[in-house]
Image (cartoon, helix red, strand yellow):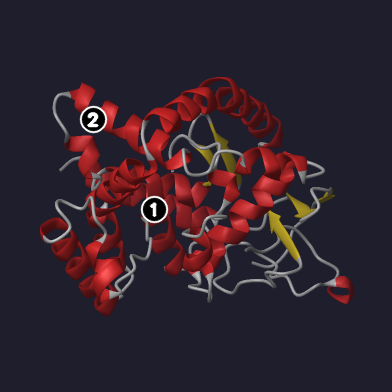
Amino acid sequence: MKFYPAFINIIMILTVITSPAVAGNSADQTGQTTSFSGSGPSPDQATGLYGRVDTAEDDGFEADIFQEGQVDQSAHTIVSDPLEGFNRAVFVFNDKLYLYGLKPITKGYARVVPTFARKGIRNFFNNLFFPIRFVNKLLQGKGEAAGMEFSAFFINTTLGFGGFNDFAQKYVGIRFQDEDFGQTLGTYGIGNGFYLMLPVLGPSSLRDAVGRAGDWFINPINYAQPWELSWGSWGLEKVNWISFHIGEYEAFKKASIDPYTAMRNAYIQNRNALVEDLPGAQKLKHSKNKDKTQSMTVLQ
């Protein structure tokens, strides 16, 4: 197909631009930022530093966010944010869209649809997204995990009534482990690149934006016909997911000095933790308090 050469070119370009160091911003977890500039030495879910760093004051950060090695997760998060002005404007747009559009709709949905039904819908979509997780596990060389993923899909599709009942987790003990193409690129040594706040889609990075495009081709929802069914399924899945996390984003904002910077840090930390398969990363992502940066995100 014609999109493959273009897609390969995108990956090659992404890899090339990761080699030179460029000016970036640093930010700690309190939401305060400090600018760095200069040149220096040469990855969705914690990160490295663009620019020249005084080694005498180095906190253990890698000098380039595109290095395979990861930095101390508990100290700071640093990622290049050359589009900060644009990103902050989009952050405000997404914030208003969530608070005055999506949140009221979701609250109404949660009042009408009982919890057990919403859990069934959540399980159904988790099962439906099997191809994304399965393919990316294969691309990452996780053969055993891919086998477990296939087993869970087969069990839930059959004994779980089309996936509405997570039979594999409840009775077999197979818990799905989220994987996407952004994580796959990270395992290939491609770093986050610069930070992006996408309209409607929410927090991302250059690498994860390319990853979204890759996952699009293996997302079954995108092939549903007519297109109204595809968009309706997409909307239902997102509203249903957010119905379990109402209030988390608001609490996140209230606890942050600078919500934009805090969200940027939390997102990059979480993405790099998932790329590195750090202990507890998947558990955090699927817990009740998982990645609150996504509570305002219409698309993941």
> Which residue is at the front of the view, 80 or 145?
145
Q: Position of residue 7 (x, y in %)?
A: 31, 47
Asked if residue 19 shows in the view, the reply is no
For disc 2, the neighbor class at 10 Å (few under 14, some 14 to 19, many from 20) is some
Which comes before the other along the chain, label 1 or label 2?
Answer: 1
| Quadrant of the image containing the N terminus | top left
Q: Nearer the viewer, mark 1 or mark 2?
A: 2
The correct choice, above or below, for 239 with respect to 15 in the image is: above
- Is 159 located above or below residue 217 in the figure? below
Mark identifier at residue 230: 2
Q: Amino acid at mark 2?
A: Ser
Task: Quote the CA–CA distance across marks 1 and 2.
Answer: 28 Å
- Give 167 or 79, whichever is nearer the viewer: 167
Query: Residue at 71% across / 61% down in the picture?
Result: 49
**Circle 1: element type:** helix
* Quarter where residue 98 is shown: top right
Which residue position is annotated with label 1? 11
Picture coordinates of residue 239, whole percent (x, y): 41, 33
SS of the residue under disc 2:
helix
Q: Quadrant of the C terminus?
A: top left
Left or right, 63 with reference to 137? right
The residue sitting at 25% across, 77% down in the picture is: 143
Residue 61 at least partly seen:
yes
Left or right for 178, reference 201: left
Q: Are marks 1 and 2 in contact (CB under 8 Å)?
A: no
- Residue drawn at the location 55% of the way across and 41% of the way down: 295
Inspect the image, locate mark 1, and give the three-letter code of the amino acid beneath it: Ile
- Image coords of residue 206 (percent x, y): 51, 47
**Quarter of the image holding residue 170?**
bottom left
Q: Residue furthest right?
A: 56
The tally of labels here is 2
